[in-house]
Image (cartoon, grey):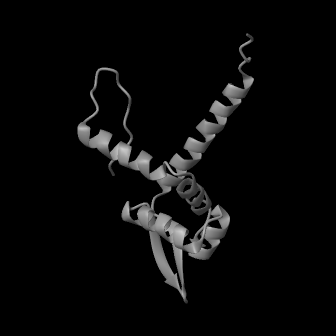
Amino acid sequence: MTDYAVTPARDVIISNELLEMSMTVLKTLADPARLQMLWALSSSDHTLSELSQFVGVSPSVASQLLSRLRTKGVLQTRKEGRHMVYSMSDERLKQFIAQTLNFADYRLDVANAEPEDED
């Protein structure tokens, strides 16, 4: 089994290929509605209708957002009756989203704890 973890080292230059893939992943997540959808999908599978209601967008907008995520290989779909059900394609992505949101929450705590500048 291959371990895909990258160990940070100051004397190693990151390959252009890895940098490009990292940027692709980050850009894919860099939309509030897509991130909300992925957060919902990290805990359970959902239909288009459920996701559009969760995020607060029309089904057509949700469909466009989900299409981009599918194109990037982030989501899988399956048909259940008349409905398409969306699911996360990789457990590591679920962990990455949770870690990203945890880090953002930490940064908010730090920012809120910093004393305000007095003029």
Q: In this figure, what is the number of numbered marks?
A: 0
For this rendering, which residue is in front, 55 or 17? 55
**Residue located 58% across and 47% down the image:** 98
Compared across the picture, whether 42 is left or right of 30 comes to: right
**Residue at left 38%, top 32%?**
7
**Image quarter for residue 82?**
bottom right
Q: Residue at x 54, y 76 (%)?
A: 85
Considering every residue shown, the one lying at the far left of the view is: 16
Check the image and report above or below for 40 versus 102.
Answer: below
Quadrant in the picture for residue 41? bottom right
Q: Where on the picture, by quarter, is residue 9? A: top left
Residue 95's x, y, as percent? 53, 49
Give the farthest residue toward the bottom.
Answer: 81
Residue extending furthest toward the front: 119
Q: Position of residue 56 (x, y in %)?
A: 66, 64
Q: Is residue 9 visible?
A: yes
Percent x, y of residue 68: 42, 63
Which residue is at 61% across, 69% downward? 52
Considering the image in quadrants, where does the C terminus appear? Answer: top right
- Answer above or below: position of 102 versus 28: above
Please give left or right for residue 98 compared with residue 16 in the image.
Answer: right
The relative height of residue 92 versus residue 72 in the rendered view (above or below) is above
Where residue 38 sits in the image (x, y, percent)?
55, 58
Q: Is residue 47 visible?
A: no
Image height check: is 41 above or below 94? below
**56 left or right, relative to 24:** right
